[in-house]
Amino acid sequence: MSSTVILGAGIIGVSTASYLSKHQPTSSIHLVEPSPELFASASGFAGGFLAKDWFSAGVAELGALSFEEHRKLAEKEDGARRWRYSSSTSISLSPPSKSKKKAAVWRSEGSSRAEAASGDRSQGIAPPWLWREEGDSVEAIGEEGTVAQVEPLQLSQFLLKKCIDAGVRLHHPAKVISVETDVRNELSSVCIADTQSSTETDVPCTNIIITAGAWSPRVFKALFPRSTLDLPVSALAGHSLVVKSPRWTEAHEAHEPHGTHAIFMAGRGGYSPEIFSRLGGHIYIAGLNSASEPLPDLATECRGNISQAAVRTLRDTAREVLGQGQAEDDLEVVREGLCFRPVTKNGTPIISRIPDAALGAGINTRPGAEGGVYLAAGHGPWGISLSLGTGKVLAEMVQGRKLSVDVSSLELDI
């Protein structure tokens, strides 16, 4: 049987493999990941904030589906223990006299995705670890039960293990170096090169799925060099910090009736901090983004490009939020991070089959569910939140089954 080859084993890729495995032989599903370390970019270093209804019209159904898939998976697989799934309370924090504006979608560096939330409630409940200043404004945003949180790395690792245990093939570190066609010029196989052993394997393949995040345009161009299509996906770099504080510990979790908290702070000089308390006593700080940071060849190279100036800014935010009088020694830095999120100009992801005409001269794919080249990328800050819904719908699309939700507005526009 011809295989389905997924290029990019981040959370979108492993989610897609998981849903594909429910309806086809698992031995026919191949995950290919070039980075020596798995989940070394956004899938391992994102905030893990989940929302049900913070999306523009074209993404709204997908957002609701994905949120429900996260909830069902966590209930079935003990997500609270395995990947720190928890209900959450989202809060907008503004300094004195700072008004909160609305925006349809999150698009660029410096803006806050909380601007897209609906269902404002004037009586917000601030977490006990949040340091308040006189005259500031705290407002709960989003309806109760419509936001949650996970630890992305642990969720990604869980999904991958489930896939491998079921029989999905992982090629890592490896990359597809060429595609081959049959006598009808239709995609028939790919050559996968193991980058450690230098061995090459030909795999019969009629379906290719590109889920390489910010690297998706490079992956596409390498496989289809005759194509004139430039995938409209770019990279937005984001620094982050994970800290521990005596103000938020596992002991506090047991007595917190509102679960974890997601704090979205008003912009300050082009920076809109996001602070998430997580199960396990960790607090995640991010929001310092840049579109000018060059995308490295491999995700593992992100670690060497961490800006210490950015880290200092995030540490200052952490001290401000957790108490301006808090001693430096009380703030334990667990991890510094830099990841690249795939973004599009209109702020919405692409979930689509790539037309044969865009693959370049001399290559076609089999019609319908028998073959095709597909793309899922451009999720911006919502990759974790939309991961399960994307994987489910993309698997349905590839296998020719009825789609759970309408994603026609997310098709590739060429």
Image (cartoon, rainbow, N blue to C red):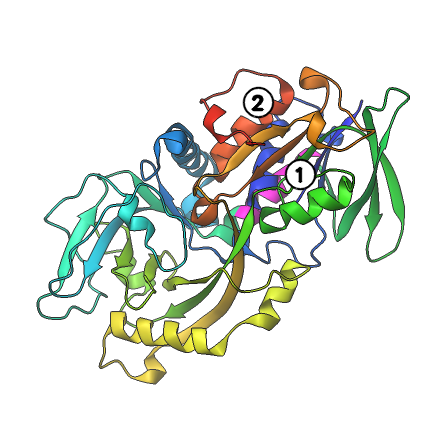
Q: Residue at x 32, y 71 (%)?
A: 318
Residue 132 as seen in the image, left or right of residue 272: left
Q: Position of residue 134 (x, y in %)?
A: 9, 70
- The answer to whether residue 257 is above or below residue 376 is below
Residue sitting at 72 percent across and 22 percent down? 371
**Mark 1 secondary-structure assignment:** loop
Number of the label disc, if any, that sits on residue 396: 2
In the rendered image, which residue does mark 1 sit on?
Answer: 229
Picture coordinates of residue 241 (x, y %)? 43, 68
Inspect the image, locate mark 2, and give the three-letter code of the amino acid beneath it.
Glu
Nearer-the-camera pick, 351 or 174: 351
Main secondary structure along the magenta-highlighted residues: helix
Q: Earlier in the sequence, mark 2 or mark 1?
A: 1
Q: Which residues are magenta?
A: 156-167
Side of 317 where 367 appears, left or right = right
Q: Mark 2 and mark 1: span between their CA atoms?
A: 25 Å
Q: At label 1, which amino acid type do we have?
A: Leu
Q: Is residue 314 above or below residue 394?
A: below
